[in-house]
Image: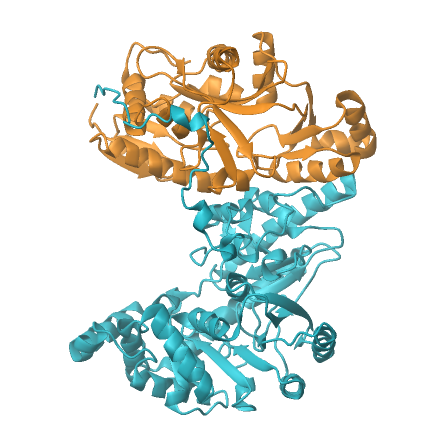
Chain colours: A orange, B cyan
Amino acid sequence: MSSQRIVVLAGGLSHERDVSVRSGRRVAEALRTQGLEVEERDMDAALLPALEADPPACVFPVLHGAAGEDGAIRDVLDMVGIPYVGSGPTPCRVSYDKPVAKAIIDAGGIATPEGVVLPHASFRELGAAAVLAAVENSLGLPVIVKPTKGGSSLGATIVRTSAELPGAMVTCFSYGDTALIERYIEGIEVAVSVIDIGEGPFALPAVEIVPDGGFYDYTARYTAGMTEFFTPARLTAEASAAVAGVALRAHDVLGLRGISRSDLIVEEDGTVQFLEVNVSPGMTETSLLPQSVAAAGLDLGAVCAALVDVALDPEVDVI
Amino acid sequence: MSTPIPASGDPSGSMAAHGSRLDPHLARYAARTHGMTASEIRALFSVASRPEVVSLAGGMPNIAALPMDVVAATVAEMLSKRGHVALQYGSGQGDPILREQICEIVGLQGVHPHPDDVVVTVGSQMALDLVTRIFCDPGDVILAEAPSYVGALGVFRAYQVDVEHVAMDEHGLMPEALREALAMLAKQGRAPKFLYTIPSFHNPAGVSQPAERRAEILQICQNAGVLVIEDDPYGLLGFDGQIPQAMRAQDADGVIYLGSFSKTFAAGIRVGWAVAPHGVREKLTLAAEAAVLCPPAYSQLTISTYLSTQPWMDQVKAFREVYRERRDATLESLEQHMPEGTSWTKPDGGFYVWLTLPPGMDATAMLPRAITARVAYVPGTAFYMNGEGRRSIRLSYCFPEPDRIREGVRRLAGVLEEELELIATFGTAIGAPGTHGAGAPETTAPGPEVM
């Protein structure tokens, strides 16, 4: 190891670049509070030559969206032999593709909303009206339409009437070629972060999300004041344990390492439904994981530094 | 690198009793801030700064055409001769010598004010802010072209002013539409505080009012007793070298003229001005002092030295040539690549082409697809206060090189083809909130730093 420097990787070319840049800046500042030498870098053509010329001790990827969360950058870091915070390429690839992750989650015994996965081509070839009628017939309404890949609710729409469905599909396909249409589950929306800072993965307090407009969309996520958060969530002790258990189980069955955040719904009867998992959770001022860290009485800088320690531990395997 | 995990000292388990909104000042914000929210459209422009993306979105002047050695020498000379003035507070109305020089510049457009009638501002954006501040109370109504400059709409929104848009054609604001708007407001018992217009090389529409139309608009406004705010940042950037006569040239009392050095010298210098009747000018000066005490002396003296020591009009001609070449590249590429049903304006100056998409398309909804294809534009909704403009796009040709413009238009054409196919599949482009919501104009346009 030629350096004790940590490279925080943020930005990239995804639709979530702006969020990533802000998350990266916050992680970098948090690490600096621990006395660590930190360099912030974008993911661009200059990155690899720079990493190879002067390899850092560790890379902390804070990239959102494709290339950052789909495992690609982790494959590249493996190839050049630089350790990094978080999961390996295969679990990232699996988790980033929501339907694939849901299938593994389902096989792992965790409830996840019923849904269908349809590429744009299916509608073109079979006729949109017929396919949408079949969707509605099969899942009922309301449903949530979202791209199979990507985060920050970009391209996602809650559909409550048949008339809204075609427009929601157009919105979704503006962001990606394949749509996941899920039965919309009413309940308490919570995010549960899992971190491993040296003694195995553990769940942080759940954050309950109550957006003013009822939908936790981009504006509700990144405008302070438009969403009310309860941390820990207003759940019974039993439900709190259940959501923590589901998040840990998801982290485990998906083969994740270091850090993850599962987005869940707690139904009225206590059933916990898994929506999706993030391998590179947002770290902005309004993001969920930092709120969980604070609620646990932990310091974000210390947690980030400990995640680096775990990444550097030769005993920990990356899948 | 072992790190202990200390407690933060503020475990927030108590938050469960009452939620957190992550901003303790929420209850204190003024009503005028309510539209100031995060926007996924604005966030998408973050990608436009990457070199892989051809950005036809931002309106950044091409300062690469400016000889930096000359600018450096100008600054050095200014500091050596007038550094003690440049680094001190100055007059709230602006440097007297610069105001004389501004009078010479606006003289090229037929405007011949006394230097006392000039108020120097931090870009013409500040002049616009001050004008709105001194004339408009919340709930007042003003008239503006449809579409209009997004930065102006941001100012009007901040002062809680209602905007009544007035239709344009290929010759700019339509007199008949102006008469209709005035009649409609009169019926409602409302009198507009002013008409805000960009008569030359309009942003975003790329069209100009011919002289006779300017005269007709002025006549209508004079008859109705409506003040005209003439915003003219591009007046010297006509590609045929002809400099249009300003509306202010015809009416010294009824027109406030706003000008800027951002496009004729450099945007970063942040110097603009207002030419106003004496009563208005006094209030503008007091309002300016309340806002910023005085415009930056450093910037004013730099531009003043540049104007007095350099052949600045030759530089303007050089800028014109650069932009004319880019305009040509844009129009040729649009002609070559755009699908049937698309139309666009053909600017004779300035920075922008206004593109109208085939029926049923939604430029706001299409933006994520364009970003994926590595091309950026500003959706038309940014230029309206009322959510209109979905079928329109502003293309800026000022910053990218001609070859990049050609590549950007080619990519955009591919995006349009894909979107048309999507519409053919689903029979609609009108989707859900989010990308489809118009939002506040300023949240659906990029910030000033976007290329």
Give the image quarter of residue B100: bottom left
Which residue is at the far front? B17
Where does the C terminus of chain A fall, quadrant-wise? top left
> Residue A164, image x and y in percent?
74, 38
The front one of B351 and B276 is B276
Q: Is residue B244 above or below residue B362?
A: below
Give the image quarter of residue A133: top right
> Residue B80, image x and y in percent?
16, 76
Count of marks overlaid on the render: 0
Decide if residue B358 is on the left or right side of residue A301. Answer: right
> Residue B436, image x and y in percent?
65, 46
Where does the N terminus of chain A fall, quadrant-wise? top left
Q: Is residue B242 visible?
A: no
Q: Is residue A311 visible?
A: yes
Give the image quarter of residue B301: bottom left
The front one of B334 and B221 is B221
Q: Is residue B231 above or below residue A197?
A: below
The front one of B333 and B101 is B101
> Residue B30, image x and y in percent?
47, 55
Q: Is residue B114 above or below residue A164?
A: below
